[in-house]
Amino acid sequence: MKRKLLALDLDGTIVNDDYVLTEESKRALARAREAGHVVAYVTGRRDVDMYNMRHDIPCADYMVLNNGGKVVRNSDGAVLYNKTIAPEDCRKLIEYALEQDLQLHICDGMTWIVTRMTEGTMDYARSLGIVPGVFRSLEETEWEKGLEGFMATCDWDPISRYIEENLPGASYVHSEPECIDIMAPGIRKWDGIEILSRLLDIPTEDVIAAGNYYNDMDMIRMAGLGVAVANSPQEVKDIADYVTRLDNNHHAAVEIVSLAGVEV
C-alpha cells in the first residue's frame, strides 16, 4: 500500500458541531497511522484555537494551521514553516480597528487578544476553555515583529473592505459565514500541504484532502483525491472527486480513512 498524506480539515469535517473529535474518528485516524499513512490536521485555526483539542493533537502527526500559513510537527511541537504578516501592515490594521472602534482579534501563537469583548467572543472563549485579553492601544500589542494573523467576526465587513483597499500585504478568507481569517498574502491551505508533502517526500498525487467549506476548495481541487463531506455547500461538492455519505456529525473521518485503503 502506498503511503498517503491525509490532509483533514477540522471544523465541519472531522470534528462535529460540538467541536468534538469522536472516539470513532480517533480510532479511524489511529488505524490510518498504523497502516503507515501520515495524518495532518489542516485548518484555519491558530494555536490558541486548538486549545479545546489539545488532548487530540497526538491523534495526528502534523498540523497545518492558519489556513496553510504554519506547519507544526506534533511529536515535539517543532514549527517547520511560519509565514507572518509584515509589521507595517499589522500596525495599519490595528490602528484602523482602534480608530473605528471595530472588533479585531490578534492571533499569534498562544497569544489571543481582542479590541472589544462581545457575547459572541465569550461564547467562543467558553468553547475553547481560554479567555482572550483585551487591548485598547497599539502599544499593548507586539506588532513590531510581525504577526501570524488576525480574525474578524462581528465587524468582518468593514475590516475586509479596508484590507482590500489599503493592505496589499494582507489577505483574508471566510472560514465561517460571519468570520474572516486574516493572514499574509498568498497563503492557502494547499500551500501548507505542499510544503509538508515535500518534507515527507510524499507526492501530491498521494495526498487525500478532505474539507467542508470554501476555504477548503483549493486543497480539494489540487489534491490527488479531493473529498467533500456530506454537509458541504454544493459549490464545494461540485469540485470534489468524492463526496462522503457521512457528515461531520456522523464520523465522516471513518469514511475518509477508508479511501486510503484502510479497513475501519
Image: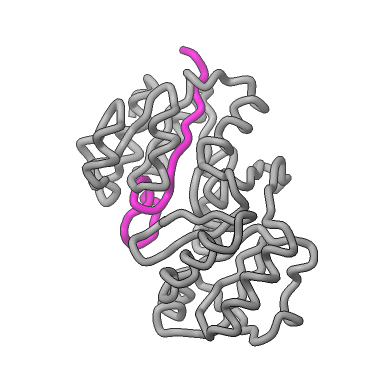
Name above or below for residue 60 compared with residue 177. above
Q: Residue 79, percent across and down?
A: 71, 46
Q: Residue 128, percent across and down?
A: 49, 69
Residue 258 falls in image quadrant: top left
* Residue 6 on the magenta span: yes
Name above or below for residue 20 compared with residue 93. above
Name above or below for residue 58 compared with residue 98. above
How many numbered marks are there? 0
- Residue for point 64% across, 87% down: 136
Is any part of residue 74 visible from this angle?
A: no
Looking at this view, is 102 or 29 the one in front? 102
Q: Residue 63, percent across and down?
A: 57, 44
Name above or below for residue 185 compared with residue 197. below
- Residue for point 24% across, 47% down: 233
Looking at this view, is 246 or 67 the one in front? 67
- Residue for point 73% across, 81% down: 140
Residue 51 falls in image quadrant: bottom right
Q: Where does the magenta region start and end?
A: 1-22
Which SS type dominates the magenta stretch?
loop
Q: Residue 111, percent across and down?
A: 66, 69
Looking at this view, is 187 or 95 the one in front? 95
